[in-house]
Amino acid sequence: MILIADSGSTKTNWSIIENNQLLYSLKTKGMNPYFQPENEIENELSSSLLPHLGNKSVKAVYFYGAGCTIEKIEIVRKRIECCLSAKLVEVNSDLLGAARCLCGHEAGIVGILGTGSNSGFYDGETIVKNVPALGFVLGNEGAGDSLGRRFVSNLLKDMINDELKETFFSEYNLSIAEIIERVYKQPFPNRFLAGLAPFIKGHLDVPEVQQIVVDNFCDFFNRNVKHYDYQHYCTNLVGSVAFHFKSSLIIAARQCGILLGNIVQNPMEGLIDYHINQSINK
């Protein structure tokens, strides 16, 4: 039995594979080593994953996660090894997971647009160039948290029409003070802001909202993708924001001269195919 995990800041998707077939899938909380201590990661594995595995032996675990940089990979790998007696535990960045899903063994530009964002150039085997994502405060252009931040900022500075502003406050039952509290004092403000994406999507017919979304994607293309050979390679994207805001993404790509390739909501299906093919070809 092998386990494949795609972990973001909000949730982790797990697929359990046996005899090159998907047995079942499940979700646990996100496990990002930049935001969560080691014991919290281990507790989540023990309480939310282990009960679903029963007594079956685990041959390999392939974990792709947000925050799994070279400095942090060992932390996650050790926590998995403590909980699962697998013969092989391989921990990689979510960006490599996106690349394997989107491109297989072909070269291309890859990006993640979910709660956070990231990008890189993939040579068919590994990520050979990566513009630093820099996270919620300094980067994450194009991501859900950046989109939410832009929207809330414009909303509170009266750059959104009064009717939509009233709709927002009524639907979320939040005051300005409560929004400030959620962003500056409570944990995971990125999740809170990214959680506003469904509301934003529901009001793309409002010109100022559409402009916020397109500008967010243009920032992603101009500040990240244009550092790669974007004129000769397609940009392939994975993530809920890329998938659900595809129409706005296409507008932004056209404005920025970006060639778009594959756009998928999550990388799991592609990762399952990738690892099953790897297993068959060994």
Image (cartoon, helix red, strand yellow):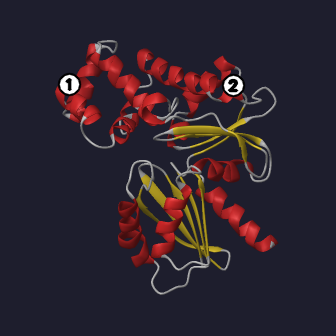
At label 1, counting other C-alpha atoms closer than 10 Å, the crowd grade (few under 14, some 14-19, many 20 or more) is few
Q: Is residue 1 toward the left or the right of residue 78 in the image?
A: right
Instruction: Give the residue furthest to the front.
Output: 71
Q: Please name the residue that numbered disc 1 is placed on.
A: 176
Q: Residue at x 40, y 48 (%)?
A: 35
Q: Is the residue 247 above or below the residue 93 in the image?
A: above
Up the image or down, 82 lies above or below 103; here it is below
Q: Residue 204, position in %: x, y? A: 44, 25
In three-dimensional space, the C-alpha distance between marks 1 and 2, rounded to whole angstroms, equals: 37 Å
The image quadrant where one finds the N terminus is bottom right
The residue identified by callout 2 is: 226
Name the kind of residue labelled 1 in the image: Ile
Where is residue 95? Give x, y as percent: 61, 47
Residue for point 31% across, 19% down: 155
Nearer the observer, 14 or 22: 14
Give the mark nearer the N terminus: 1 vs 2.
Answer: 1
Which residue is depicted at the point 47% across and 87% down?
Answer: 55
The secondary structure type at the circle numbered 2 is helix
Q: Quadrant of residue 281?
A: bottom right
